[in-house]
Amino acid sequence: MAETFSTLEKNILKAKGLSDSQLDSLIASGIGSKQDFQTVGDASTLCQLVSGIDSPTAHAVMNWATGQPAAAAVPATAQAPQVIIDTADVIHCVHCGAKQPKDYKSGDLCTSCGKQAEPVFACYWCASAGPGKFCRQCGAEFLPTADLDLGILLKHDGLPKDIIPERLRAMSTAEKDVLWGRVRKLRG
Ligand SMILES: [Zn+2]
Ligand SMILES: [Zn+2]
């Protein structure tokens, strides 16, 4: 009897996007432990072994099983948060365009029209929130609020931070619908 995955491992594989039948087909092909993924080696081989698995899912599974790229590819120094500082620190109100005073702080109300001078967004990458176009914690470009959950899903799939906003902008409604299906499945 070949080794099989623990309940936890099965749940993780499903969270990565595998359906029950794909999980069965994975096990039927002889993969029964995290170790076996090392033998599989890469996502394209996994696609050949498991029918119906899509490439982002295969990548997500391989990233988890082989511990890449988070562990291997990124040197520790590159992890330091990249803080974006506005040049000259001049903020203009998004509503009326009025220039805000020198002592303006993120979140302040516009001195001219009284509305919040900058819209506040949640960051899909590091989950902090803030005004402006880019996250001040990690430098990620903020996504439109409607795409936030999709950004989180793509991060989960292992896509790099600077690719995700671009990728979402290029997507058709149908492609986004497929992603939304996976978001709902993960929420379970
Ligand atoms: Zn204003
Ligand atoms: Zn961030």
Image (cartoon, rainbow, N blue to C red):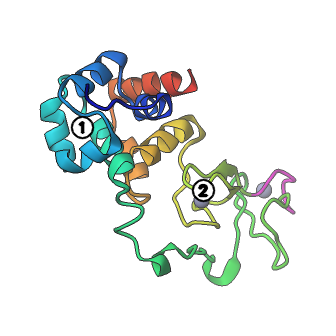
Is 30 left or right of 175, judged from the image as shown? left
Q: Residue furthest front?
A: 1
The kind of secondary structure element at disc 1 is helix
Is 93 left or right of 52, judged from the image as shown? right
> Mark 1 touching mark 2, by CB under 8 A?
no
Residue labelled 1 has its Cβ within 8 Å of some atom of ligand 2: no
Location of mark 2 (residue): 126
Q: Quadrant of the N terminus?
A: top left
Q: Was residue 113 drawn as part of the magenta stretch in this picture?
A: yes
Mark 1 to mark 2 CA distance (whole Å):
25 Å
Frontmost residue, 13 versus 89: 13
Location of mark 1 (residue): 55
**Residue occupying image coordinates x 46% and y 32%:** 15
* Residue 45 falls in image quadrant: top left
Q: Position of residue 28 (x, y in %)?
A: 21, 22
Determine the quadrant in which ligand 1 lies: bottom right
Is 30 left or right of 3, judged from the image as shown? left
- Badge number at residue 131: none
Q: Residues within 10 Å of mark 2 (few under 14, many from 20)?
A: some
Residue type at mark 2?
Cys
**Residue occupying image coordinates x 36% and y 17%:** 20
The kind of secondary structure element at disc 2 is loop
Frontmost residue, 183 versus 167: 183
Frontmost residue, 163 versus 145: 163
Q: Residues within 10 Å of mark 1 (few under 14, many from 20)?
A: some
Name the main secondary structure of what is drawn in magenta.
loop
For marks 1 and 2, the one nearer the N-term is 1
The magenta-colored residue range is: 111-117
